[in-house]
Amino acid sequence: DYAVDNAKEYIPPRKGFQIMNVNELTKTITEEPKAIINNFLLEKGITVIAGTDGIGKTWFATQAALCIATGTPFLDWKTIQKPVLLIQFELSIEQLSSRLRKQMETFPEIPKEYLKIVCFDDEDKLFISQWEKIKDTITENDLYNGVVIVDNLYTSVSGDVSDNAQMNQILSDISYIKNSTGNAIILVAHHNKGTLKDKQLNKDQIQGGKQLTNFVSNVLQ
């Protein structure tokens, strides 16, 4: 009797895609995508910063982090203040602290909730897939509707970023994080070796290839 009185209808899980009719879509989804940084980063968007070794990609990424966390224009582009999670795989925490101190001298004071840094310990290993741990870090710290900066893509994974199967899994993980947390994502990526012989820049030089560059919203080299 209790089971009957308290029964809940079983709804089978959806197997296909969710659909909306055109009137539902146009009446319920009315806001245009907003730019966090004009010309560079959209809300829930993905931007890649790519370049050859030693060109200053990390300086560029930390400058973007500070600009977003304070609402300061980045490259003279209007910037909306958002909370930022900075994940830096290459520098030691001491090196990162030193760089940030130098850059912060020209910024207003940053509210403590607006820029958080991932601090690696002895248990954290590089060159394994870090995206599950990134997702857990975001949810454990309630970091939603902000910006996640990952520097860099190459050291955040366990395999070869030029491998199609590997890249498909990476992009699937990134897409899930973006959609489930509302965060925009900035990825720092490397160029393939020996691609600057012609002194030209093109997207094919970026590790991850067209799978990566066609997936993201913006690419800055």
Image (spheres, rainbow, N blue to C red):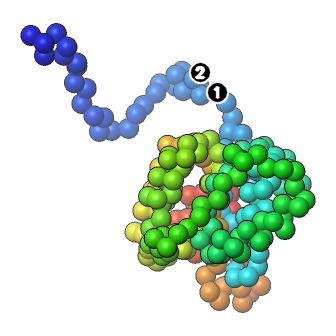
Q: Secondary structure at mark 2?
A: helix
Above/below status of 184 relative to 32: below
| Residue ID at (72%, 48%) | 112
Seen from the viewer's position, the closer of residues 209 and 118 is: 118
Which residue has dot 1 on it?
30
Q: Horizontally, is 40 left or right of 27 in the view?
A: right
Q: CA distance from mark 2 to mark 1?
A: 6 Å
Name the quarter where the C terminus is drawn. bottom right
Image coordinates of residue 11 in percent, x first then y, are: 25, 26
- x, y percentage for residue 104? 84, 60
The residue where tag 2 is placed is 27
Say above or below: 191 vs 219: below
Estimate the x, y position of residue 1 in percent, counting from the top left. 9, 10
Mark 2 belongs to which amino acid? Lys
Q: Is residue 145 above or below residue 47?
A: above
Q: Residue furthest left?
A: 1
